[in-house]
């Protein structure tokens, strides 16, 4: 991410993140505030009733059926570590994209895995991000299934991170591996390929401060084994109250699906007008754009100007080692114009 916003004296908006440009849902935020009054009590170790509420959100007609495969965590990061540490030791490989979210690499290396190429089918661990942060690449659910089956050896643990999946639109569940339970069960039983679906809920609902994630296991038995290794009271009362409220906020998601593509297209239009030599990557429904200026010095200066204007962006030099790229969050054009105004100095 860009410089810590707290250290920017003239801070206006954080364009370095991939959170929802609509901000935190008001009703869920109020529910979280009320939950602070309960901090003298332990949160429920079984995450209820928030777990049931999330299951009903994910599977509106079959929440009770699939809830035994669902686990909450203190952010997706906790669950990423848990799933990776129970995988068969050996090599890990990323998805077949130029780069991806680095938390999987960090966790895999910490667990003793060695990194191999995306095409190495001998890896015992495959971690993919779909849609891919930061590149914005996307594979449909059928393409994803074919890729996993075609490249995974028996005994492989597969994690597919679908944190950005809800941005696709009202049909997002139907293009998600969360709704491919029969397929997941079949390849686990017949091929020994075990697919876990990871979600960080802090992006779509703009609540990164509370840490809230979930994972869907390939079967209930695998979930119980994972749960046994999780520390108790992993998700606090504030996050649980927020979750129970936000899954019912249909109006917020409807606004997200309406406005995010509009704002994304508006940002692309301005970038194309003022910086025609730059290349903008990613799907138009996503909460960010991935920009290649094709020049290291230009990108460095763009990152500096953005921060100086109080609108920091995410440089792809640190971490991703792609120094001509940077990421811009999709926001209301009114505030985006402030960022663009600072960058226009590069066009002169």
Image (cartoon, rainbow, N blue to C red):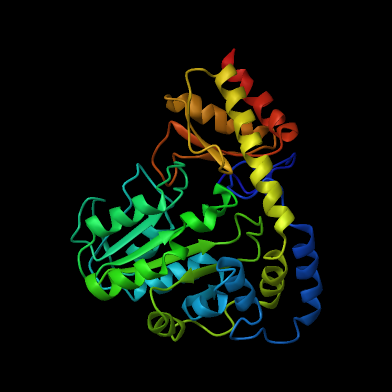
Horizontal relation, residue 144 to residue 156: left or right: right
- Residue pictured at 73% horizontal, 87% vertical: 41
Instruction: State which quadrant residue 342 falls in.
Output: top right
Residue furthest out toward the left = 122
Left or right: where does residue 200 sit relative to residue 330? Answer: left
Nearer the observer, 4 or 240 = 240
Tell me if I can see residue 283 in this picture.
Answer: yes
* Quadrant in the picture for residue 138: top left
Q: Is residue 307 visible?
A: no
Could you tell whether 104 is left or right of 347 in the image? left
Which residue occupies 22% across, 62% down? 123
The x and y percentages for residue 194 are 32, 70
Q: Position of residue 121 (x, y in %)?
A: 20, 57
**Total numbered circles:** 0
| Quadrant of image for the C terminus | top right
Is residue 223 positioned above or below 295 on the image? below
Q: Is residue 197 above or below residue 254?
A: below
Viewer-closest of 119 and 327: 119
Report which quarter residue 73 is drawn in.
Answer: bottom right
Relative image position of residue 19 (x, y in whole percent): 62, 50
Above/below status of 268 relative to 273: below
- Residue 110 position in % (x across, y down): 35, 66
Residue at position x 80%, y 65% from top?
Answer: 30
In the rendered image, the residue lying farthest to the top is: 348
List the single residue furthest toward the front. 61
**Foreground of the two, 174 or 218:** 174
The residue that appears at 60% across and 77% down in the rendered structure is: 51
């Amino acid at each position: 991410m860009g410089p810590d916003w707290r250290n920017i004296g003239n801070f206006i908006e954080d364009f370095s993140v991939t959170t929802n440009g609509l901000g935190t849902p008001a009703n869920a935020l109020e529910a979280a505030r009320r939950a602070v009054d309960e901090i003298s009590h332990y949160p429920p170790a079984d995450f209820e009733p928030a777990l049931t509420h999330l299951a009903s959100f994910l599977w509106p007609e079959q929440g009770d059926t699939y809830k035994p495969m669902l686990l909450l965590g203190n952010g997706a990061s906790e669950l990423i570590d848990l799933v990776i540490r129970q995988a068969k030791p050996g090599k890990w490989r990323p998805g077949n994209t130029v780069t991806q979210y680095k938390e999987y690499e960090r966790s895999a290396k910490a667990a003793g895995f060695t990194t191999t190429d995306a095409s190495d089918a001998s890896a015992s661990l495959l971690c993919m991000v779909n849609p891919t942060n930061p590149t914005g690449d996307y594979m449909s659910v059928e393409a994803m299934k074919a890729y996993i089956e075609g490249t995974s050896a028996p005994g492989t643990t597969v994690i597919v991170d679908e944190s950005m999946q809800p941005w696709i639109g009202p049909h997002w569940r139907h293009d998600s591996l969360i709704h491919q339970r029969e397929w997941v069960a079949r390849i686990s039983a017949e091929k020994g390929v075990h697919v876990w679906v990871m979600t960080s809920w802090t992006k779509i609902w703009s609540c990164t401060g509370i840490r809230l994630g979930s994972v869907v296991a390939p079967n209930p038995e695998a979930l119980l084994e994972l749960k046994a290794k999780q520390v108790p009271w992993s998700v606090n009362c504030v996050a649980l109250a927020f979750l129970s409220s936000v899954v019912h906020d249909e109006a917020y998601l409807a606004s997200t699906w309406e406005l995010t593509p509009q704002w994304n297209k508006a940002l692309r239009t301005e970038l194309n007008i003022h910086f025609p030599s730059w290349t903008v990557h990613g799907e138009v429904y996503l909460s960010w754009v991935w920009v290649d200026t094709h020049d290291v010095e230009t990108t460095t200066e763009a990152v500096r100007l953005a921060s100086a204007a109080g609108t920091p962006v995410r440089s792809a030099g640190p971490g991703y080692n792609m120094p001509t790229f940077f990421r811009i969050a999709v926001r209301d054009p009114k505030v985006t114009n402030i960022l663009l105004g600072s960058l226009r100095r590069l066009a002169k």
